[in-house]
């Protein structure tokens, strides 16, 4: 993870996740055309021009062509874009894209009154993985951070949500949960992966699932999908320490 800190003067961020792009713009995934869904999201947000955080599963078929399409969609975006890997992503391809403007490679963002940390939870299976070396880096970040609240973005969820996707959550979560329990600056986590908009609030910590730009997963014991239109989540981090989020449908 890159240790440099990216400064941003605005407290509004839009999270987009689980785009599941394929090699062609009109190729289908679960009955929809994911490229067209993502295209609609970006067109709707363009006038607002928010900083974007894309939290994984940006491709469905792992193809180089899908990343070319993503780069073309983002090429003239008027604000910084941060890309995180999901279980479907190829880390090398995503890292390469992260070097092309407007994409950025930093994994820490400094907003007025807040710190945003972008975590890589990708493993070798559909489930999340956060090995000891990544955990050690988080400990280093805590040591050289200010007293401002910290919020995490990543692909996989930590706490169960009660559906089939819990089989593929963050598998080695003990270290991350221990950090949350002992560090009052850590205020919560926003993730993708679940294709489901929800919020879980526990004392000072929140876990929020961002709906997918492609299709949503039903809260069932088996995998079922539903097209609810392209979706995303707008985050507002107030300098006072207050936090707000809004699920978006386009």
Image (tube, rainbow, N blue to C red):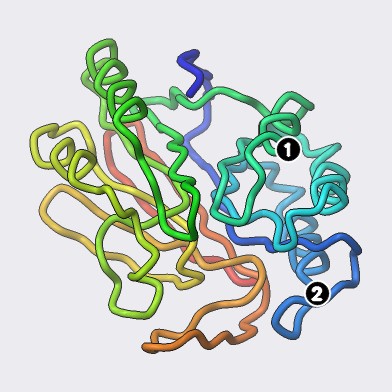
Q: Above or below — where is 36 with respect to 220? A: above
How far, Cα to Cα, is label 1 from label 2?
A: 22 Å
User: Could you say where residue 122 lies in the image, as x and y percent from the top left?
Assistant: 48, 46
Q: Which residue is drawn at 78% across and 39% down?
A: 77
In the structure shown, which secondary structural element does the residue marked by tag 2 occupy? loop
Q: Residue at x 51, y 19 (%)?
A: 2
Q: Which of marks 1 and 2 is nearer the N terminus?
A: 2
Which residue in the protein does label 1 denote? 93
Task: Using a 10 Å C-alpha cutoff, classify the residue at mark 2 as few (fewer than 14 neighbours), some (14 to 19) or many (20 or more).
Answer: many
User: Number of numbered discs present?
Assistant: 2
Q: In which quarter of the image is residue 138?
A: top left
Left or right: 57 in relation to 122? right
Could you say which disc has been placed on residue 220 in the image? none
Task: Using a 10 Å C-alpha cutoff, classify the residue at mark 1 as few (fewer than 14 neighbours), some (14 to 19) or many (20 or more).
Answer: some
Q: Which residue is drawn at 37% across and 52% down?
A: 244
Residue contact between numbered discs 1 and 2, judged by CB atoms under 8 Å = no
User: Could you say where residue 210 lies in the image, as x and y percent from the top left?
Assistant: 47, 62
In the structure shown, which secondary structural element does the residue marked by tag 1 occupy? helix
Quadrant occupied by the C terminus: bottom right
Q: Residue at x 34, y 25 (%)?
A: 133
Q: In which quarter of the image is residue 58?
A: bottom right
Which residue in the protein does label 2 denote? 33
User: Could you say where residue 18 lies in the image, as x and y percent from the top left?
Assistant: 60, 61
Q: Which of marks 1 and 2 is in front?
A: 1
Q: Above or below — where is 171 with respect to 154? A: below
Farthest residue to the front: give it.
124
Q: Quadrant of residue 158?
A: bottom left
User: Could you say where residue 222 lies in the image, as x and y percent from the top left?
Assistant: 43, 88
């Amino acid at each position: 993870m890159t240790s440099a800190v990216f400064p941003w003067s605005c407290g509004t961020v839009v999270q987009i996740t689980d785009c599941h792009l394929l090699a062609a713009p009109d190729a289908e995934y679960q009955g929809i055309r994911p490229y067209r869904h993502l295209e609609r999201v970006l067109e709707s947000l363009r006038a607002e021009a928010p900083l974007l955080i894309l939290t994984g599963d940006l491709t469905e078929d792992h193809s180089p062509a899908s990343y070319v399409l993503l780069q073309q969609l983002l090429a003239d975006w008027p604000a910084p874009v941060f890309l995180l890997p999901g279980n479907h992503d190829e880390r090398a391809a995503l890292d390469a894209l992260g070097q092309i403007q407007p994409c950025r490679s930093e994994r820490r963002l400094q907003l007025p009154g807040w710190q945003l940390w972008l975590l890589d939870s990708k493993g070798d299976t559909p489930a999340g993985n956060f090995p000891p070396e990544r955990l050690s880096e988080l400990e280093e970040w805590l040591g050289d951070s200010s007293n401002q609240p910290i919020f995490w973005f990543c692909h996989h969820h930590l706490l169960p949500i009660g559906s089939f996707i819990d089989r593929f959550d963050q598998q080695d979560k003990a270290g991350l949960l221990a950090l949350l329990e002992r560090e009052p600056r850590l205020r919560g986590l926003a993730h993708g992966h679940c294709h489901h908009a929800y919020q879980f609030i526990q004392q000072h910590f929140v876990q929020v699932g961002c709906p997918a730009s492609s299709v949503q997963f039903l809260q069932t014991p088996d995998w079922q999908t539903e097209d609810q239109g392209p979706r995303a989540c707008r985050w507002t981090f107030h300098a006072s320490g207050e936090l707000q989020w809004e699920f978006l449908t386009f």
